[in-house]
Structure formats: structure tokens, C-alpha cells
Image: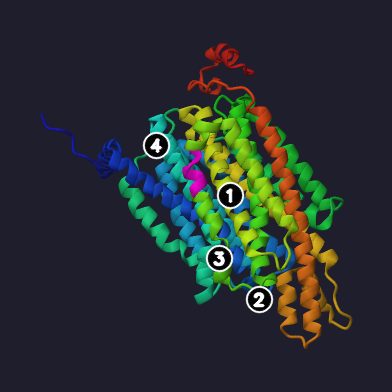
Amino acid sequence: MTSAPQTPNSSARTDRTRSDRIRTDRIRTERGRRLALGVLVLGVLLVAVDATVLSLAIPFISEDLHPSGTQLLWIGDVYSFVLAGLLVSMGSLSDRIGRRRLLLWGSAGFGAASLVAAYAPGPGWLIAARAVLGVAGATIMPSTLSLIRSIFPDDRERATAIGVWGAAATAGAAAGPLVGGFLLEHFWWGSVFLINLPVMVLLIVLGARLLPESRDPRPGAWDLPSVALSMTGIIGVVYAVKEAAVHGPARADVVAAGLLGAAALVVFARRQLRLAVPLLDIRLFTDRRFTAAVIGALVALVGLSGVVFFVSQYLQLVRGYSPLRAGLAELPAFAGAIAGGLLTGWIVRRAGARGALSGGLLLMGLGLGALGWARADTSYLLLGTVFLAVGTAEGLVYTLSTDLVLTAAPARKAGAASAVSETAYELGAALGIALIGSVLTGLYRSGVAVPQGLGGAATHQVRDSLGGAAEVAAGLPQPTAGAVLSSARAAFVHGMNAASLLAAALLVAATVGSWLLLRRPESPVADEHPADLPADRRGATATEHGTAA
């Protein structure tokens, strides 16, 4: 009996099935899992470095593209802003269409957007390109983390893999200024985006060969109203915070955006509780470990990203460091991030999750608070110690919070759960620049003194940003130039001190909250979570978990 001839489509499906089987067999070996982890680390490095590599380029962008102060903030945080708005949606999408597939698609988009950003002719183009980078980045981060869960089923192996992944994420963010400093010393500011291209090509080639496909076997429909509500809510709230910090909370657009964002998030949460297969399982927050981890990651990044945004400007424009020297000055944060991530398991075994998470948040708060007393001539020994402490604490907090989130969620919802962790991370980064950066900008504008006789355009440029003041001063005679720079630097340092103390206060509050939330151990959420069950079984299981059906 002869078999029916294969059509081109069936032949292609057979080839894909055979390739998937080969990749799945490969990761059953320890060497295969390590290779797969290396590919995933490339993905997280790509996104993490891009979040901070731009910081040292801000003065060069100011000189070349002449953005306003508000545009400068948008250039800095629109990436994290869009990324945060889409992470939950993309994490849920990866559960449905395949985590490997979404990772590879997102990597290709990331490379294309990087090319546009590198050659942006104006601030509007750069903001738009950074927004597209955020869309692509939202497909990469949850895919990498959820693939770790499927590749490493053993708890101990998975904890080690998450430690490596977390170290790569925090170290990548910390290494961004160093990489940027080296490039800016030799090339133009667009080069900080072009470094994404070789990493992206390597990720696509190796990912297609080494990573297995993974998806939710019963994903349900992708709820588009939930996608729209989550993005509207996050963007509305972040926009309101950002603009209120700069222009005050009474403006009509600030009030409208805040109310719209808050209303969208409330409707989103209520909708998730009604859906049989929610985009984000709100019930996960009934696990105190999950809630403590998400809040800890969110607040840690609010403080850290806001400070990172202005520290690079402080080192270059106040202390007079070259871009490369400024990047090297921040190197202790890079070393600390690696150490904190890799030592997380050891610290947790000795201090417990409660002590480790709360201690990490407190150490970060104390480190950031120390910058509240920094001056233009502060000893680098103090600054380097602060950078080391903050980097170590961030590596610990990020890795531990990620592990707590993943272990608290059902395995089938790995993509959606990891997206919650990454949303906290990226939303914290966006809020940090919006809130902490905007507080600094507001204090700078109110504190800088402009000499009499300076033209209207030059006066506006001086008041807009420290980079603008430095550019104006370069074309003025002495001693007018010295007076402009002295006043601008003093106003900037004053704003930096206040913003650092605000960040420290937020971290101390998060320390107290984490300590209280983790005061009593909980058993992990069962793999059969109420939202995953048929309707006729959901009520009984919800009672067992102490959640509302």
C-alpha cells in the first residue's frame, strides 16, 4: 500500500516537527541546556544594555539634535515606557504562538529599530525609534524567562539559570554606560544603537538552531480588549506622573491622563477576574511572595533608573569626565550586579527570602540616599562605594524577585507570569525617569540663574537642561560663560541631591512593605490554579487556595 503524496505544506510541517524534536532532544543534555541558556542571556543582554547605554550619549544628542527638556526625558524613558505597557500582552501572546517564535521575531524587529535610531535626523525620529525598540523588547524579555522555566524543569538547575539570567540583566544595565562611554570616545552617538545589530544576528542564528519551542497547550483566545486596557492604563498613569512632576498636577492633560489610566487599569483588573482565560491572572497577587516580589522589583527600579539617568550627566557635565572615564567610573555597579545575581541563592539559604529581599532593598536605599550629599568635588572613593553597593543590591533584588514570581505561578502561565516580573522592572524604569528625573528637572529649572542680557532663545536653552547650559556657555565670553556653568551645575547638583533622597525614601518604604508581606512562609501556588480549571471545578479549588472564584 502506497502512502499519499506529501503536499508542500505538509512537507514543511514535517520538517518543522523534525527540527523541533531535534532541539528538544538536545536540551535534555546538560550541555544542551547550557547552550540554550547562553542564547537566552544574549537576548536579555540586548534589551538590558539598550535601556542604559543611551545615558552617556545624552549630552551629545543635546548638542546634535537640540531636543527640549521634555523631549530629552522622552528620549530617555519612552523605551521603558512602551516596553512596560506591552510586556503583559506580549508575555501572554508568547504562551499562545510560541515563546521561541516570538523571541526570534522580536529580535529581528529590535535590530531594524536600532538602525533607524542610529541615524535619526531629529528628536522626534529618535523618540519614535526608541518606542519601536520598546515594542520589540517587550517580545524578548518574557520569552527568555519563560523559556528558562521550560528548559530547566529541575528546581535547583532553574534557580541557578535564573541567577545567571538575572546577573546578565542587571550587569547588562550596569554595563550600558561603560559600553556607551567607549563608543562615544571613538564614534558618534548613533553608534550606541548599532552595537545591537551583531548581537541580534547572533541571537537569531543561534536561537533558531538551539532553542526548543514552548507554548501553553490550552492558551485560550488572546483578549484584545484586555491588551488595549492594559496599555492604556500603564501609559496614562506614567504620562500623568511624568508631566505632573515637570508642570504640576493641575494641568488638564495631566488630570485627564491620570484618570483615564487609573480607570483603564481598574476595568482591566475586573475583566481579568471574569475571563475564563485571563491575559493576566490577578489571583496570583493573593500569594504574598508574588506581591512582595513585584512591588520590590518595581520600587527598586523606580529609584535606580531615575538615579542612573542623572548620574551619567553629573559625571560628564559637572565633574568634567570624558564619556569613557564616566563609563569606567560606573564600573563598580557592573561588578556588583554580577556578584549580587550570582550570590542570590547563597544569600537566600542563609538569610531566607524575607531577609534577602528586604536587606537588598534597604542596601539600595542607603546607597542612593548617600548621593543626597554628593557635591561636584565629592571623593570618587565614596561614589565608587555607592555604585558597588547599589549594583550588588540590584542584582540580588532583581534575581530573587524574578525567582519568587516564577515559583509562585503555574508552569503553564510561565510567559504571563514572567511578563508581570518584567513589567514591574520596566514600569519601574519608566516611572523612575518620569518621577525622579522630572523632580530633578523641575528643581534645576527653578534654581538656575541666568545672567542679564542673555537672549531669549539662549535663556530658554540654559533653563531647559544642564546640557543646554553647557552648549550656550561654550559660545559665551568669560566670565559670563563661567557664571552660567557655575549656576547650572549648582542647580543640577541640588536637584540630584533631592531626587536621590526621594529615591532612598521609596526604597526604605519598599523594605518595610516586603518585610511585612513575607512575615510568614506560604506554600507555592499549585500548578492547577483556579483560573486554569474548568468552570465546574474552579469554585472548589479557589476555596483551597483562599481566593475568590
Dot in front, 3 or 1: 3
At label 4, the amino acid type is Ser
- Numbered disc 1: secondary structure: helix
Dot in front, 2 or 1: 2
Q: Which of pointers 3 and 1 lies earlier in the amino acid sequence?
A: 1
Q: Is residue 540 left or right of residue 66?
A: left
Q: Is residue 182 left or right of residue 450?
A: left
**Separation of marks 3 and 4 at Cα, in angstroms:** 38 Å
Numbered range of the magenta stretch: 339-345
Q: Residue 141, how many percent across, how many down? A: 50, 46
Q: Residue 247, how many percent across, how many down? A: 82, 57
Q: Is residue 80 above or below residue 474?
A: above
Residue sitting farthest toward the bottom: 477
**Separation of marks 4 and 1 at Cα, in angstroms:** 22 Å
Name which residue lies at 50% across and 76% down: 186
Q: Which residue is mark 3?
A: 327
Residue sitting farthest toward the left: 1
Q: Do residues under tags 2 and 1 come within 8 Å of each other at their CB atoms?
A: no
**Separation of marks 2 and 1 at Cα, in angstroms:** 27 Å
Name which residue lies at 64% across and 57% down: 308
Q: Which of pointers 3 and 4 lies earlier in the amino acid sequence?
A: 4
Residue 63 image label? 2
Dot in front, 2 or 3: 3
**Separation of marks 2 and 3 at Cα, in angstroms:** 20 Å
The answer to whether residue 71 is seen in the rendering is yes
Q: Which residue is mark 1?
A: 83
